[in-house]
Each structure stands twice: as structure tokens, then as C-alpha cells.
Amino acid sequence: MHKLRKRLSEADEYAMNSSGRKATWILLLMAAGAAPIPSGAQQNAMNAVSPEASPEFRVEADAPETIAADVYSRMSRVHGDIELIRFVMGKPKIEGPEITVTGVVPREVYFQAITMFRKANRLSFEQTRVVASTPETPAGDIDPGNVLAVVNAALERISHVKARLEITTVPATPQPDSSKTPTDVFRTIVQANRQLNLLLDERFAPSDVFQHVTLAVGYAARLLARFPGDRIPEAPELIAGKQPRDVYRRLVGCFSVIRDIAAGSGLDILELQAGDDHTGYVTPSDVYDIASLLVSELAYIHSQLDGAKSPRQVYYPGRKFPSDVDQRVGILEAQLIELRGLVVARPDWLRETRVD
Amino acid sequence: MTESADEGGHGAPTIPVHFKSGGLRRKLLRSFLGLTLFGLVLLCTSLVAIFWLRNSANRLALQHAPSVEAALHARIGIQRSLAGLRGWVALGRSEFRDERRAAWVEDIQPAIARLHDLSRDWTDVEDQERLAGLDSLLADLKESQWWVEDVAQTEGNHSARVILRKKVEPIARAMRSAIDAMIDSGDFKQGIDERSTALARLSRLQIAHMSSDHMLSNFVVHGDGWRESGFHQDLTVASQAIEQIASNLGALGEDQRSQLVILQQELPWYAHFAKESIAARRSERWNAAQYLMTTETVPLSEDLIGRLNALSTNQIGSMRRETAYVDRVGKNAVFVSIGLIAAMAVIAGLMSSSRARQITQPLSSLSEATRELAAGRLQNNLPVTTDDELGSLTQAFNHMRVALQQSEAKLKQSYDALAVEFDRAENLLLNILPLPIAERLKTGEGIIADSFADVTVLFADIVGFTQLSASIPPEELVRLLDEVFSRFDALLDTHGLEKIKTLGDAYMLVGGLPTPRPDHAEAVAEMALGMLQEIASYNAQHETPLQIRVGMNSGPVVAGVIGRKKFIYDIWGDTVNIASRMESNGLAGSIHVSEECYQRLRPAYVFEDRGFIQVKGKGEMRTYFLKRRTSDDDPGGQERTSGRG
């Protein structure tokens, strides 16, 4: 008992000092024999506290250069694992057409993969209580190798769930198809995201979208800070009865404005098409995905600003309805339209040096 | 100025009317314009001072004071917005949120816009830069407030609560469900004692878990009731209870064992996330909005308020400095104006005096010269010193002087000539008329007819003149008469007698008029004797045989001037007729006198009594021949009369 108390204290201290090692004391507690933990759960806890990816999901430094085909091949494994879990959990399969995008670059794939990681992390918490920190966005240009690292991190979360559910089947991983492009990878990650959402007890809700849109508002405010005037306009009137598809459509419209801003600034971003045939099946998770895409593009533009401050931290907003999200998207929309007008007047704004 | 006057010539001198310097008009104009210009300078100076003072007053009234007011307004707005935000963060009442937003709309934005309007006239670069910096800071503040307001009343504002709700509570629910399921289950495998022991342990676990959970919730939500040792003790009790229950698995049924596994799995995670939640609650960022407000919004507000204070302080300083400066300049302006007015008075006086002297000096010279000219003392031209009307006037005066002197000379010549002519005419008149008569005629007296009671009339006539005139040329005859009569005239003057007229070779004179004289008879007698001597002298000189007859009579006559043209002074009366008869009845070379004449001349003269002779129209009269003066014969002066009879 004395040993257990001592190890608990040490674990507390350790957990408080390092978020990457938050669960270490639990491991110590369990290792001390305080409880006969089953091997599966113990293994999950072990994985949860490990700051490094397990060898299976580690991208070796001396590995040959990763290409989109490699990531696509890895995503096949992700889809296989998700399908196994879905089957065991008895969750529904996703419906509706895939999102139509073209001209995707690894950067955009990366942020969609981050979204996938978050969903996998939430699934992992719900099923195993094991959580991990979101991978840090690498400095500089993002390549398929960075995307693969995030995909592996998400796959690791999924593997914990598999282990908890005692799923031992390992799906076959196809050989990389060199014809696959980042756009193909993007689409398959989006599909994985949609399916992951259906596996969650607490699915991605309007509040998550709201939080993400608020993050986009923060990015837009940082961009508008390069110009005189207000950065966050008054919120439009709240219109009750909005549906996720309404928010989705509005976000797609915002994405179009971001494309204009990027084009006006000399940047390239993907082309997104979402017709009514797609938006008919929209869930809050889909809205979250598109919001993530918007955030990724705004983050990209923001990264081009010299000396720009980081966007503000956003907080869990509590329960929100699609109408609340729609109202917040209205703020973002107004910001983006304002920014588009300003960029037209000052197309070299990204190259103007300034420290906020 | 061009001197083109012809002083000696006859043509009119040319006086310039156009002047290189513009003439007196331009000088006067310059003089007046000079004074006016100086006055205008004074007025302009005053106007500049007035406008400067007005602008300064305006700047004070319309720029600095409103700037200070706007800065204060903005500061109040920032404080109001901050107060509203604090109220919203603390109480979550919408009126505080509305107050914050109203502060921006009603106070801050209008005040800053006003400051921008006013800043166009600011001269202080520091304030301009300060205001420019305010815009960016205000945008930062507004955005910061937005974020504080946005997060303040959300669940995420308290991250500890989120951890509690999202992570701890699901685990706690699962644990409670597992404990409840184990207690409620009747699946105990062993006897009543073991069952009681297991239930007691489960109860202890349940109580310890509920206690820790309650303490955790209370601390995370309300921030109080936290006892570190108590929480750890509850966790330890719970852990011990789980260990003890697990140590006797044989007492548990299958379902209870599976619930125990859940408890074994969840308790460490509960402890983990509880610690995470506690750490978040203890963090300085436990209230995100409060933290953001404290670390960003308030410092930004203070920075802005500091800058606005600095701006208003600077504006107040500028206002005070300008007030003092305006006051100083205002006083100086009064003194300067007084000085300028005094200077203007002095300069105007000097300029006027100078100009007046310039203008009047030639006029004075001209006036003096005119007096000199009038007095006839001006002999030289006045110097022409100015190229203007006065110079022209001086030049004209000089020409006038010359012309006047020339005219005077001509007039004098004419006057002299006229005087000569007058004298000649006078002499001629006097040759015709006696001086008094002539004087009376000149005075305009109309008819002159005077009676003289006693005069002596003489007639002389050249004897044989008719024959003589036929024998010699007329010119010579005239020359003869002229010389003879001229000699008579000279005698006439000698004796003071009055020649009446000549008629052919007859010569008529009278003594005793027009100015009566008592010795008129003696004078005429002397004339007659002299006439005889002159004839004798003429004859001797020219070897001619001329002879004259002389007749004399004394008595009253009427003398006067008759006619209006070729008038003569003549005498009428019987005395004249008798004198004429005395001549015509006389003898060549003799002086034939009447009784009346004889009576007046005796005894001073020697007579020869002719006796009675027949006189036409008179009858018989006793006449005498005057021979000589008695004194020529007798120094005693005894009268002698020789007679025929």
C-alpha cells in the first residue's frame, strides 16, 4: 500500500510536468499491482502514455521518400480497421457521394488528416480512455511524409480501439498505386472522417464546428490586422431553424472567397465543389471537415504573413445549434469578403514586412 | 524737362505737358499712395495680427479643447467598455455586454473619429503619430474584448469544467454504474460473511468515490471545498477497496468480475483526468476570459488610456503654451500697433512736410519771383528744379517774365513814342490853342467862350506879298513865310503872348488872354517892335526887301474855340476888327495903333500921331504909329508923341 501511494504521488508529479506523459502515473499505478488489469487494457494504457509511435506506425528517417501513393495505401489500412471496428460496434455505414475536390496539395491533405486524428483520438478516449496530443504542424512546406505521419498517428489510435475491442484481424494493405494523387488521398481521408464520426458515442456536433469556425474567425482577424479597420464585424442576426447543410453551403461559399483571396495574393489552393447532391447528406461532422479545410487554408495564408501573431486559442463553446454556427459563419463570411476587397487593393500585402 | 521756350523769339514757347517723372500729379499720387501704402502696411499688420490671434483662438477653441474633450471621451469610452466587459465576464448579464458594445458605438468610435478630424490641423507630429498608433491599438482592444466576451459565458471558459464534464464525468458515471451493478447484483458466490465483506468494501468504494467526485466537482465548479489530502485519501480508499475486492475474486460472480474490471480500468483514468481538471482549475488560466482580460485586454486598455492621457496632456500643454503665447502676442500686437501708428504719424508728417516743401518751394519761389517781377526787379530766370507741373510753371513763368519784359520794353518804346507824339500833339495843340484852353478842352469842356475886358490884339501882314508870291516859287515862298513866322513865334514865346492864327501872310496875336495880364498892351507893343526888327534882320540876312504892316488895338474881346474839327482858338469883337483895320490901314514898316492902344502905352512908347483916319465900318478914328520905346530915346522915360497934326 505504501508503495502504491508513493507511486501515485510520483505519477501525479510526472503527469503534471509533461502533457506527453500524463498517463505515466497510471502505468506506474497499474504496474505497482494495485489492480489486476487485463492484458488488453494494460497494453492500451501503455500505448497511451508512450510519447512515441509504436514501430508499426513510425515513419523511419531513412525511409525512401514518401509519395501520395504511400499515404493512399496507408489509408486503405485505416479504412480496413475502421470497417472492422464499425462491424464490431454495429454502427452504420456512411452514405452519400464523396466530396468533389481537385488540385489538392499535401498541405490540404495534412490538415484533413489532422481532423481524422482528432476523431480517432476521440474514439480512442471513448473506448480506451487513451488520448494523445495532436501532432504539431511541421514548419515549412508539408510533404506526403508529414501526412503519412499523421495518418499513422490516427491509425495508432484506431489500433488501440481495435485492441480494446479485441479485434485481431489485420486488413490487407495494398501495394502503393503510383497513379494516386494528393486529391485521391484527400478524398479517402474525408471518407474515413465521415465513417469515424459515425463510430463515436459523442459525434462531432455543431459545437465542434462552432469551435472550428471560431478558429477560422481568429485566423481571419489576424489576416485583417494587416489592414486598418475593424477585424471582427458584428454578428449577423441569428436565424433559427438552420440545418447542417445550410452551414455547409455557407462554408463552401466562404471557401470560394478564400480561393479568391489566395488567388489575389498569388497563392494556389484546391478547388472544392459541393453540389446539392452532396449537401443533402451533410452531417455536422461533414461540416466540421469542411470547416477544417477552411481553417487549413486560412492557416496556410496566415503562414505566409511575415511576423504575424498566432491565432487565438479557441475554447469549447458549449452546446450549439446549427443556427449558432451559421451565425458565426456569417461573421467569418463578412471578414473574408472584407479581406478579399482589401487584398484586391493591396495584392502585395503578404510580402509587406510587419510584426504585429 | 525740355526747355524749348524761345526767349527772344516771337513764337509762343513750348512748355512740356508730359513729364518723364509723371509730373506733379504722379508725385502727389506717389505721396498719397506712399502714405496710403504705409497705412495699408499698418492695416495689414494689424489684420495679420488679428487673423493670427483669431486663428490661435480658433485653434484653442476649436482644436485643442475639442481634442482634449475627444481624448477624454475616448478614454471614458474605453473605461466604460472595460467595465461592461468585466460585468459580462463576472455576471454574464446581457446589459453589461450591451454596455460594452454601446461604449464603442457611442463613445470610442465617435471620439476617435473626432480626433482624426481634428488631427488634420494638429501641428504636433508626436500627437499625429500617437493618434496613428491608437488606431491599431484600438483594433487590438476591440478584437481582444470580442474574444473575452465571446468566451466568457461559454463552458470552455473554464477548461477545468470541460475536463470534468467531458472526461471525468463519463468515467465517474461508468464507475458509479459498475459499483451499483456490483452491489445490486445477487451473484455472490460465497457465504454471507464474504458477501457482507464484499458489500462493505463496495460501500466503502462507493462512498470514497462519491466523496472524491463531490469534492472534485465542488472545487472545479465553485473553487472551494478542496482538501488535497482528503481527495488523495478517498482515491487511496477507493483503490484499496478495489484491491481488496479483487483479492477475493472467488466471491464475485461473472458479471461482478466484469464490473470490477471496469472499475480497475476506470479508476486510474479517473484519477488522471481528475488531476488534469484540478491542475486546470488551479492554473492561472482557469478562467480563460478573465485571464485574457487580465493579460491582454486590461494592459491594452491601460496602454490606450495612457496614450490618450498623454495626447490630452500634450494638447492641454499645447493649449496652455498657445494661450500664453497668444496673450503675449496680443500684448505685443497692441504695442506694435501703437508703435506703427506713431511711426505712421511721424512718417506721414515727414513725408507730407517733405512733399509739401517740394511742392510749395517752387510756388514760394514763384510767388517771390512774381513780387519781384511786379516790382520790376526780376532780371533772371528762376531755376527749373523739378520735372513736373511746377517745373513747367516755373519755365512758363520764366517765359512769361521774358515776354513781360519784352512787352514792357515794347510798351515803353510805344509809350515813349506815344509821349513824343503826345508832346508833339500837345505842342501842336498848344500851337493852335493856348495852354489853358487846351487844358480845358482836354478836361472835356464843351464850349469855350470867354469874355476878356481888356486885351491887345495885333495883326501883321507882309507888304506886297501877293506880288512876291507871284515872283518866287511856292516852295521858296513857303520857306520864307515859315522862317519869318518862326521868328515871330519865337518872339511870341519871349513875350508870353498868344498867337491866334496866321492867314496867308497875315499873323494875328493877342496879349492879355487867355490869362489876363495888365501889361498886355506893352507886351504886344514889344512884340510888334520885335517883329519889325526880325524883318529887318531877315532882310539883312537874305538881302530881301520884305516889309510888314502891323496894326494894334486894345479893348474887350470874346475868345473861344469854335468847331469840332480843325478847331482854332479865336477871338471876336470889335477890338479885333479895329486891330485888323489898324493893320490894313497902316503903313509898311510901321506899327499902327488905335487910340485905346495908345492910351495904354503912353508914355512908355514913342508914338507918331497919325490923326484921324476913316476906318471902314467905324468911321473916323484917331490913330498913332508906334515908333519905339521911350526908354530908347530918353533914359528918363518921358513920353513923346510926334504928330502930323
Image (cartoon, rainbow, N blue to C red):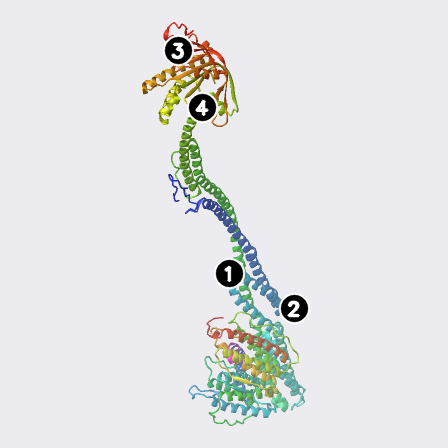
Q: Which residue is mark 1?
A: B127
* Residue at mark 2: chain: B
The mark lying in front, picked from 2 and 4, is 4
Residue A4 in view in this figure: no
**SS at badge 4:** helix
Give the tally of numbered discs: 4
Q: Residue A150: x and y, percent?
A: 50, 85
On whether residue B645 falls in the magenta region, the answer is: no
Pick whichever of labels 4 and 3 is earlier in the sequence.
Answer: 4
* Residue at mark 1: chain: B
User: Do the residues bearing badges 4 and 1 touch, measured as CB atoms within 8 Å?
Assistant: no
> Which mark, residue B627?
3
**SS at badge 3:** strand
| Segment colored magenta | A15-21
Q: Which residue is mark 2?
A: B95
> Which mark, residue B565?
none
For the residues labelled 2 and 1, the Cα–Cα distance comes to 35 Å
Instruction: Give the residue type at disc 3.
Output: Lys
Mark 4 neighbour class, 10 Å CA radius: few under 14, some 14 to 19, many 20 or more: many
Mark 1 neighbour class, 10 Å CA radius: few under 14, some 14 to 19, many 20 or more: some
**SS at badge 1:** helix
> Which mark, residue B432?
4
Dots 2 and 1 on the same chain: yes
Instruction: Give the residue type at disc 1.
Output: Asp
